[in-house]
Amino acid sequence: MATAKRPTVLFVCVRNSGKSQMAAALMRQSAGTDIDVHSAGTDPGSDLNALSVQVLDEVGASTDGEHPKPIDPNLYSGIDLVVVLGAEAKVEAPEGLPVQTWITDEPSERGIDGIERMRLVRDDITTRITRLAEQIRTGLTVSA
């Protein structure tokens, strides 16, 4: 981790419309200005997932001003950690840049869909964000 600047995390999923946006909003809420947060997709969609936005609103995590966007390769130079949400997104980060992959809960595999699915996904990501934010704040290694 760089010590001269705030730690910076990039959250990535395929569409950048649901899980990576959730993770980014929840990290911003959890860390405030302690951690710089970005999100992107390997194949970005056109709009944020409405149910994702709704369940984030329920807990006060904002997606205001956000939209699906591709990974900007220039962004890598300022990133301390890449977190990939789900097994589908493939990220080719520069050598030496730590990349974690979070295989998040998928309630639809248990027949749970709609708003209840999104709440469970949000809660899984929230738990992971809380742990990651604490690791970053205390200076623990955040590599994979």
Image (cartoon, helix red, strand yellow):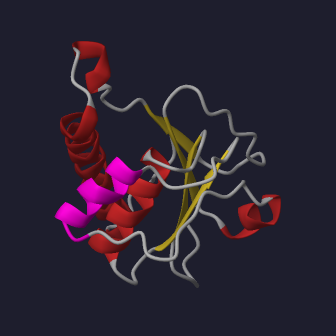
| Residue 38 vertical position relative to residue 34 in the rendered view, above or below | above
Q: Is residue 63 left or right of residue 115?
A: right
For image coordinates 69% across by 42% down, the residue present is 42
Q: Where's the N terminus, which quadrant?
A: bottom right
Count how many numbered circles sit on residues in the image.
0
Residue 45, x across and y down, in percent: 63, 47
* Majority SS type along the magenta span: helix
**Magenta region, residue range:** 50-60
- Seen in the image, is 98 located left or right of residue 73? left
Quadrant housing residue 61:
bottom left
Residue 142 higher or lower than 24, as above or below: above
Q: Residue at x 30, y 29 (%)?
A: 105
Q: Position of residue 118 (x, y in %)?
A: 27, 41
- Residue 134 position, x and y percent, is 28, 62
Residue 4 versus residue 130 in the image, above or below: below
Q: Is residue 111 left or right of 27 when viewed as pictured?
A: left
Q: Is residue 19 above or below residue 111?
A: below
Q: Nearer the viewer, residue 95 or 37?
A: 37
Nearer the observer, 138 or 27: 27
Name the residue at the right extreme.
74
Q: Quadrant of residue 115?
A: top left
Answer whether residue 65 is magenta in the image: no
| Horizontal and vertical percent position of residue 102 | 43, 36
